[in-house]
Image (tube, helix red, strand yellow):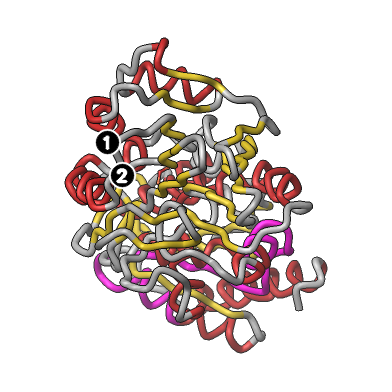
Amino acid sequence: MKPRMLKANTWWVGAIDWDRRLFDELIPLPDGTSYNAYLVQGTQKTVLIDTVDPTMTSPLIDNLVQLHIKDIDYVIINHVEQDHSGTLPEILKLYPNARVIATPNGKNLLMNLLLIPESKIKTVEHGETMSLGDKTLEFIHTPWVHWPDTMCTYLREDRTLFSCDFFGSHLAMSDLYVTDEATVYEAAKRYYAEIMMPFRKIIKSNLEKLKDLKINVIAPSHGPLYNKPEFILEAYRDWTYSPPKNTVVLPYISMHGSTKKMVEYFVNSLVERGITVKQFNLADTDIGKLAMALVDAASIVVGTPTILVGPHPNVVYAVYLTNALRPKLKFASIIGSYGWGGMMVRQITAMLSNLKVELLDPVVIKGYPKEDDFKALDKLADEILSKHKEHDLI
Ligand code: FEO
């Protein structure tokens, strides 16, 4: 994709990755992604804001060549993860006079992860400004979106916020700005769920730091830019501040049908009580969809058979991720079956230690469910209903 002008002398010079299907060898990318880098030319200085993934070195350099960029004074690294900084060594070879700007944490990571010499790096404090001549940059430290090093760079005259991962979405598309809000909302929510949700409390303080800025455009480093910033700011406020919803997330797996029968019965029981259910068969599920469902849910009920005395390994994976993502969940329970005993409940419970959830009595049965087991599932559904009502979720 060729350079694209945001404003006079401010350019998108990044790369669209239509084909990538996995990030960090973990996160599904059903819609590809982009690595947005930006070039800002002031009357006195030229800066490159972020670079691109090392696999996309050529598109970035081609864009700089097409713009006839002979000198870069500074490369601003808002975030050191390699999808944004990985091309920095190549850029510094091409532009040997360029210095690198980062937060103090960013400097440390640049030296350790990319072996950038200390003498090349200038650190900036929160609120510090830099004049490019007719343009002014302000650096806003926004840690943990998504590493401790992260900051946003605000271009005052254009009222543009370069936010790197913050507000991003893994979405490859030809449109520079958001055109289809529903598509971008889904991708941005997936991104928030997978990348940002563990840092929800810090995100609140980062949103506070931005609230007095006049922002015309939010230019993240993944996905389309927002020329109606309130769209994504409001979404972030909802995901971080709003109470959870009257929803049960139900990830499960079944080997021989007993747990599946319990899940089918239990889902109907919850729905009859007016509770929304999001059910995921972990034999073949998009873990990003599960993460998205966790953004809003008040309860999780895990369904698993017993294998080698514990939960099914796919359930272990899903529970581990849920615990790591630290969603707003308030209640948790377990349903499932065993043949001759096991420690499945104890093991799953121990894996949920990050979550401030109340554990509701599990329903774990021997073999295929029978009449009393269905009654126990109804009782669990009643208890979830009662808890959701107590918290004004219904
Ligand atoms: Fe897009 Fe945390 O890197």
**Residue 91 part of the magenta segment:** no
Q: Amino acid under label 1? A: Thr
Looking at the image, the residue that sits furthest to the bottom is 272
- Mark 1 — residue? 87
Comparing 262 with 76, the one in front is 76
Callout 1–callout 2 Cβ contact below 8 Å? yes
Magenta segment, which residues?
235-264
Which residue is located at x 39 percent, y 65 percent? Answer: 252
Residue 288 visible, this angle = yes
**Residue 339 versus residue 201 in the image, above or below:** below
Which residue is located at x 48 percent, y 25 percent? Answer: 106
Sequence order check, earlier mark of 1 and 2: 2
Which quadrant does the C terminus fall into?
bottom right
Q: Amino acid under label 2? A: Val
Q: Position of residue 80 (x, y in %)?
A: 41, 32
How would you rate the neighbour count of disc 1 (Cα within 10 Å): few for under 14, some for 14-19, many for 20 or more? many
Q: Quadrant of residue 285?
A: bottom left
Which residue is located at x 25 percent, y 54 percent? Answer: 22
Q: Label for residue 97? A: none
Relative to 345, is 340 on the left or the right?
left
Q: Position of residue 1 (x, y in %)?
A: 25, 62
Comparing 212 with 242, the one in front is 212
Could you tell me how far apart the alpha carbons at marks 1 and 2 are, in whole angstroms?
6 Å
Q: Quadrant of residue 96?
A: top left
Q: Label for residue 52? A: 2
Which residue is located at x 38 percent, y 78 percent? Answer: 261
